[in-house]
Structure formats: structure tokens, C-alpha cells
Image (tube, rainbow, N blue to C red):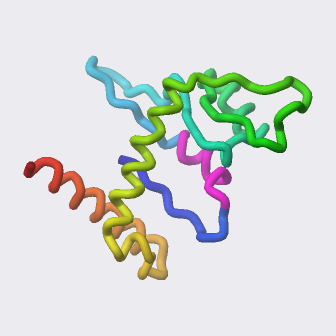
């Protein structure tokens, strides 16, 4: 699992490229892991030209709906695969599970390194809970 901590006032789309550069996709066969997914699903908050260009350059299919203020502009409306988009719920559920930990939900920690450690501990706690069922 990969978690990136940013400043509270920073929009999460600003950390999009560094986060995807850190992705390693495990494979069944031996060798170097893949570093690029086939598609990336995001909500309307990620519908920026910069992000779409980056995905296009790296041959990744964007599954991001257009924001309402972008509809009708040059290029028309963008189509996206609703079946792939439904897979976003996995991430949303993971964030919900992490927020069950009060210390993570309210961010008691002032330092980012301490907060990242608490997120890691919350992830381990969740995995242990799933494994012991």
C-alpha cells in the first residue's frame, strides 16, 4: 500500500504525478514490476489538462468525468468507461476504513512523518483485522 502525505491546504491533484511515479504493480511472473497501470480512475477533481496530458504521455487511459465548467469546450465532452469508474469505490472504502482510526481522521500529529507513521499503523491494523476473520 502506498500513502503520500501533503500539506492540508494543498490540492491532492498537485501530488498526482509523484504518487503515480511511485507505483509498482506486482506480477505473477518473475522480473521487474510494472510501473504503469492500464487506466486511472479519478473523480471530477482530477479533470485537469495537466493530468490528462500526463496520462496520455504515459499511455494510461484516463477514467475521469469532466467537470461541469469544462463541458462544451473545444473537444466536446469526454467519454469514459463507467464500469472501470465503479472500481473507484475500493479507494473510497479504504479511506473510510482509515478514518475509523480517530487519530488519523483528526490528524493529531503535527509532523508529516509522524502522521504518515500513524497512517501506516492504521493500515496494518486494518489488514490484521481482515486476516483474523
Residue 109 is situated, as x and y percent measured from the top left of the image, at: 43, 80
Magenta stretch: dominant secondary structure: helix
Residue farthest along the right direction in this orientation? 74
Describe residue 85's horizontal placement relative to residue 55 as left or right. left
Residue lying at 62% horizontally and 21% vertically, measured from the top left: 59
Nearer to us in this view, 122 or 95: 95
Nearer to us in this view, 128 or 34: 128
Nearer to us in this view, 26 or 98: 98
The quarter holding residue 42 reads top right
123 shown above or below 115: above
The quarter holding residue 26 reads top left
Residue 83 is situated, as x and y percent measured from the top left of the image, at: 50, 24
Describe residue 131's horizontal placement relative to residue 13 as left or right. left
Residue lying at 39% horizontally and 57% vertically, measured from the top left: 96
Residue lying at 29% horizontally and 63% vertically, measured from the top left: 122
Q: Which segment is the magenta one?
A: 11-20
96 shown above or below 112: above
114 shown above or below 90: below
Q: Would residue 67 be counted in the magenta stretch?
A: no
Nearer to us in this view, 18 or 40: 40
Describe residue 7's horizontal placement relative to residue 119 as left or right. right
6 shown above or below 110: above
Describe residue 21's horizontal placement relative to residue 87 as left or right. right
Amino acid at each position: 500500500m502506498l500513502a503520500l502525505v501533503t500539506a492540508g491546504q494543498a490540492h491532492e491533484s498537485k501530488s498526482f504525478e509523484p504518487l503515480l511515479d511511485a507505483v509498482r504493480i506486482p506480477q505473477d511472473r518473475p522480473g521487474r514490476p510494472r510501473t504503469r497501470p492500464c487506466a486511472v480512475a479519478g473523480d471530477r477533481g482530477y479533470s485537469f489538462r495537466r493530468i490528462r496530458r500526463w496520462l496520455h504521455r504515459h499511455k494510461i487511459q484516463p477514467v475521469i468525468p469532466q467537470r461541469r465548467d469544462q463541458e462544451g469546450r473545444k473537444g466536446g465532452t469526454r467519454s469514459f468507461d463507467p464500469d472501470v469508474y465503479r472500481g473507484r469505490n475500493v479507494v473510497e472504502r479504504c479511506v473510510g476504513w482509515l478514518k475509523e482510526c480517530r487519530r488519523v481522521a483528526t490528524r493529531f500529529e503535527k509532523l508529516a512523518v509522524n502522521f504518515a507513521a500513524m497512517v501506516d499503523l492504521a493500515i496494518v491494523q486494518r489488514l490484521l483485522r481482515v486476516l483474523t476473520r
